[in-house]
Image (tube, grey):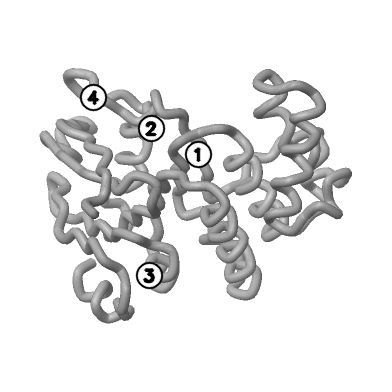
Amino acid sequence: MEKVKLNIKNVNKSYNDKIIFENFNIDFYKDEVNIIMGKSGCGKSTLLNIISGVNKNDGEEIDSLKNLGISYIFQEDRLIEWLSVEENIKLVIKKLYSKTHVDELCEEYLKLVGVSEYKNYYPQMLSGGIRQRINIARAFVYPSKVIVMDEPFKSIDIKNKKNIIDSFKLLLKKEKRTVIFVTHDIEEAIYLGDKIIILGGSPIKIKKNINDCNHLNKEDVAILI
């Protein structure tokens, strides 16, 4: 069966005289994990911001993904320090559902990422790994169709990273979302990805679409970046 694609066309962005994107087109698999890789500073985060509607496209407006509803997971967790874990989760959905349903969803998603026991804690009391799990739960509890992730595991130690990624995969198994995920970590990309897109050049082009990540090894990907 042919996979459903989300198409982004005519991305353009310049800073002063430097052209970053020029009539750039990219496709993502719907309801799967799309990994974006490339050298540092090549424009991966800029692309995320344009397709999610955070930054404007130069020239005509593109059909960004913001109309599908987007949850954004950054490298830093951006939890609100003066709210408890439970309050941070509920904040993003309290206007969408009844109080009873909000309570139920909060319990469900904190349990799914394994941090239920911390629901009454404040973020400054918690480790970086626990905070990022909460950040992931908060992104998934919101009824978005697209999850955009910009190196969310970069600052997490290896042991915690494996646990957090497994929690993330558990959430994806429970409910399908289109994930657009920027990372420099090749093992992370292979473990999580359904599709890997390698970017490079100036203006940026797609160097390679890897449409099947089964049986890939690090060397297969490293040589393309």
Q: Amino acid at mark 3?
A: Ile
Question: What whole-number distance in Å separates the C-alpha atoms at marks 3 and 2?
Answer: 24 Å
At x 67%, y 27%, the residue is: 93
Q: Quadrant of the N terminus?
A: bottom left
Residue 171 x, y percent position in the rendering: 58, 53
- Checking the image for residue 52, the label placed there is 2
* Three-letter amino acid code of the residue under disc 2: Ser
Residue indicated by mark 4: 62
| Residue labelled with disc 1 | 72
Q: Between 38 and 40, which is closer to the camera in this rendering? A: 38
Is the residue marked by circle 2 packed among few (<14), some (14-19), or many (20+) residues within 10 Å? Answer: many
Identity, as a three-letter code, of the amino acid under mark 4: Ile
Q: Position of residue 185 (x, y in %)?
A: 41, 67
Q: Residue 75: horizontal and vertical position, in percent?
A: 53, 50
Q: Residues within 10 Å of mark 3 (few under 14, many from 20)?
A: many
Image quarter of residue 165: bottom right
Q: Marks 1 and 3, how far apart in space?
A: 21 Å
Task: Find numbered disc 4 in the image and state the secondary structure of the residue it sits on.
Answer: loop
Quarter residue 52 falls in: top left
Alpha-carbon span between mark 2 and mark 1: 9 Å
Q: Please identify the quadrant where the C terminus is shown.
A: bottom left
Examine the rendered structure and indicate whether residue 119 appears above or below residue 170.
Answer: above
Q: Residue at x 44, y 39 (%)?
A: 146
Mark 4 and mark 3: Cα distance apart in space: 30 Å
The mark nearer the N terminus, 3 or 2, is 2
Please tell me which residue is depicted at 16% across the width and 47% down the height of the picture.
204
User: In terms of image quadrants, where is residue 99?
Assistant: top right
Q: Are marks 2 and 1 in contact (CB under 8 Å)?
A: yes
Q: Secondary structure at mark 3?
A: helix
Q: Secondary structure beneath disc 2?
A: loop
Whether residues under marks 4 and 3 lie with C-beta atoms below 8 angstroms apart, the answer is: no
